[in-house]
Image (spheres, grey):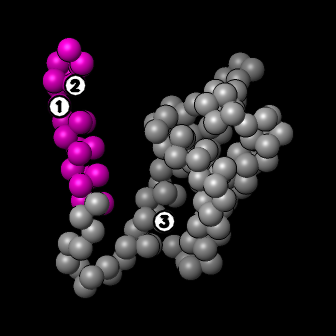
């Protein structure tokens, strides 16, 4: 990833509303979430939501697909991965120095590896 591209992605995420939308898309997973649900969850009016979703799509942080009359948006995980890799490339001379990142990665792996019986609430 080039510095200019990374700067464009970070600038898009530098707006509070777009960051909130992107975090919701990341939580929704690869299937995404339809635009109406995003607006409801974040209490955003349609025109504002459309503007910010268009921006995230334009820079490549979000993808969209239409199913019937609904438009679903999803985080562009490969772009997010490239941005994180760009930000952490050559970090600390190759030593593990990001304990929060390592903690998130291991907790996600633990949830993914757990059997359904282990993850269901009692």
Q: Which residues are magenta?
A: 101-122
Which one is closest to the eye, mark 2 or mark 3?
A: 2
Q: Is residue 112 magenta?
A: yes
Instruction: Give the mark, 2 or 3, whose residue is nearer the N terminus.
Output: 3
User: Quick check: 8 above or below 2?
Assistant: above
Pointer 3 residue? 83
Left or right of residue 51, residue 72 in this image: left
Name of the residue lying farthest toward the right: 47
Q: Which mark is residue 66?
A: none
Q: What residue does disc 1 label?
A: 114
Q: Residue at x 59, y 47 (%)?
A: 20
Considering only order in the chain, which callout, 3 or 1, is on the residue closer to the N terminus? 3
| Element type at mark 2 | helix
Mark 1 Cα shell of 10 Å, populated few (<14), some (14-19), many (≥20): few
Residue 61 magenta-highlighted: no
Rendered image quadrant of residue 119 = top left
Kindly state the secondary structure of the residue where label 1 is placed: loop
Q: Considering only vertical position in the picture, is 114 above or below 77?
A: above
Q: Is residue 93 left or right of residue 35?
A: left
Residue sitting at x 66%, y 59%: 15
- Camera-nearest label, 1 or 2: 2
Q: Nearer the viewer, residue 4 or 40?
A: 40
Q: Based on the displayed image, in which of its 4 quarters is residue 10 positioned? A: bottom right
* Residue 65 seen in render: no
What secondary structure prevails in the magenta region? Answer: helix
Give the percent coordinates (x, y) of residue 33.
58, 31
Q: Secondary structure at mark 3?
A: helix
Residue that carries the numbered disc 2 in the rendered image: 119
Asked whether the viewer can see residue 29, the reply is yes
Q: Residues within 10 Å of mark 2 (few under 14, many from 20)?
A: few
């Amino acid at each position: 990833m080039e510095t200019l591209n990374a700067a464009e992605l970070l600038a898009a995420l530098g707006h509070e509303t777009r960051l909130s939308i992107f975090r919701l898309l990341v939580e929704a997973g690869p299937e995404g979430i339809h635009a109406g649900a995003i607006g409801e969850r974040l209490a955003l009016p349609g025109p504002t939501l459309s503007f910010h979703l268009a921006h995230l799509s334009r820079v490549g942080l979000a993808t969209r697909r239409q199913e019937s009359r609904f438009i679903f948006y999803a985080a562009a995980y490969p772009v997010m991965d490239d941005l994180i890799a760009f930000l952490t490339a050559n970090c600390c001379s190759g030593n593990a120095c990001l304990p929060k990142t390592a903690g998130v990665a291991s907790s996600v792996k633990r949830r993914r590896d757990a059997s359904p019986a282990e993850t269901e609430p009692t």
